Image (cartoon, helix red, strand yellow):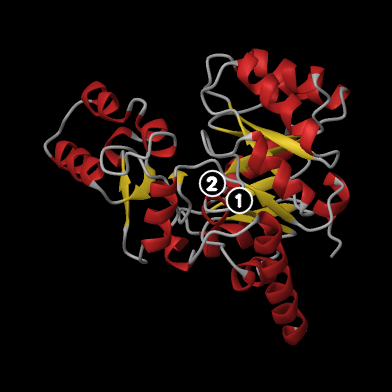
Amino acid sequence: MKTRITEILGIEYPIIQGGMAWVATYQLAAAVSEAGGLGLIGAGGAPASFVREQIQKAKELTDKPFGVNIMLMNPEADEIAKVIVDEGVKVVTTGAGNPAKYMEMWKAAGVKVIPVVASVALAKLMERGGADAVVAEGTESGGHIGSTTTMALVPQVVDAVSIPVIAAGGIADGRGFAAAFMLGAEGVQLGTRFVVASESIVHEKYKAMLIKAKDIDSAVTGLSTGHPVRSIRNKMTKEYLKLEKEGADFMELEKMTLGSLRKAVVEGDVVNGTVMAGQIAGLVKKEQPCKEIIDEIMSEGMELLNKTF
């Protein structure tokens, strides 16, 4: 399947794996790229030295295109931005900020820049700044979220910009893939579905919790602080929401979540840790290799699109 996204990124299928902190390691990124999609290494809050090591290890596993997701609030964002150039990474997705200060450097190095946006205004700003595409991410996503649903956000962003739009949020199978394309997207980004991939280093307890989750099992914390996060309900979310309701200040709430994602992903503490996942966790039924996930999505998605047209 060819779209502007496959052509820009040099990939076989218009499927991108989300750059999830602690989850999107070189093993997962390389596996997705080998399967024909675009794998992303999630820099999260990691130091630049760690990101460089992850990139180098991914190169040992695949010679296909892969990228890095950089959270612009990372204290070492400047160094990571340079590492991306030094290591010859050709795709970067960005979140939590405006990548304008790095655009000239990245463009000169031939890096394709794809910011994640949660509004039409931000999508327009990114296009003016030189972005090659945008990921329009709906509130159904796991982790840090905006307020507009994918169904409403994607077509409005498509209408507002001329660069390609990648849909994200609430997409886990061929039906979501086909729906995204019907809305005008030219690619999709999946997070939760790839969390349970065989190549994902996520703790088995985390994977099991996602596979067991139902449609109503996610909760959004942090609304009072302006930094909403979607994750699976557990003891931690219950206590956090209680404190929010009681008017706890930002620092008290921040203390609760400090290191909590690592606690769940690496240590398997799915009671006190943050189990980030989207609302489509109920569609994630089993652990599968990345190639199988992508093949299933493409097969079902193309069948549906062919029926429609």
Q: Which residue is mark 1?
A: 136
Percent of width and height locating residue 28: 64, 43
Q: So how many labels did they put on this image?
A: 2
Element under disc 1: strand
Image quarter in which the C terminus is found: bottom right
Residue at the image position 74 percent from the left and 45 percent from the top: 133
Q: Which amino acid, by three-letter code, is at mark 2?
A: Ala
Secondary structure at badge 2 equals: loop
Residue 31 visible somewhere in the drawing: yes
Q: Residue at x 45, y 54 (%)?
A: 278
Tell me the residue at 49%/42% (across/down). 202
Taking the view exactly as shown, the residue that stands out farthest to the left is 246
Q: Is residue 170 above or below residue 229?
A: below
Dot 1, crowdedness within 10 Å: few (<14), some or many (≥20)? many
Q: Quadrant of the N terminus?
A: bottom right
Residue 14 in the image: x percent, y percent?
A: 76, 57
Q: What is the number of the mark on residue 154?
A: none
Tell me if mark 2 has few (under 14), some (14-19) or many (20+) residues whose alpha carbon lies within 10 angstroms of its own: many
Q: Nearer the viewer, residue 114 or 265?
A: 265
Residue at 87% across, 22% down: 108
For mark 2, what is the residue? 118
142 left or right of 259 in image: right
Residue 176 sits above or below residue 137 on the image: below
- Residue 71 is drawn in which quadrant? top right
Q: Position of residue 117 (x, y in %)?
A: 58, 43
- Look at the numbered discs 2 and 1 and tell me whether their residues touch, using CB distance below 8 Å: yes
What amino acid type is highlighted by mark number 1? Ala
Dot 2 or dot 1: first in sequence order is 2
Residue 243, picture quadrant:
top left
Q: Whole-Å distance between the Cαs marked 2 and 1? A: 6 Å
Q: Measuring from the top left, give residue 53's x and y in whole percent.
A: 68, 21
Left or right for 51, reference 1: left
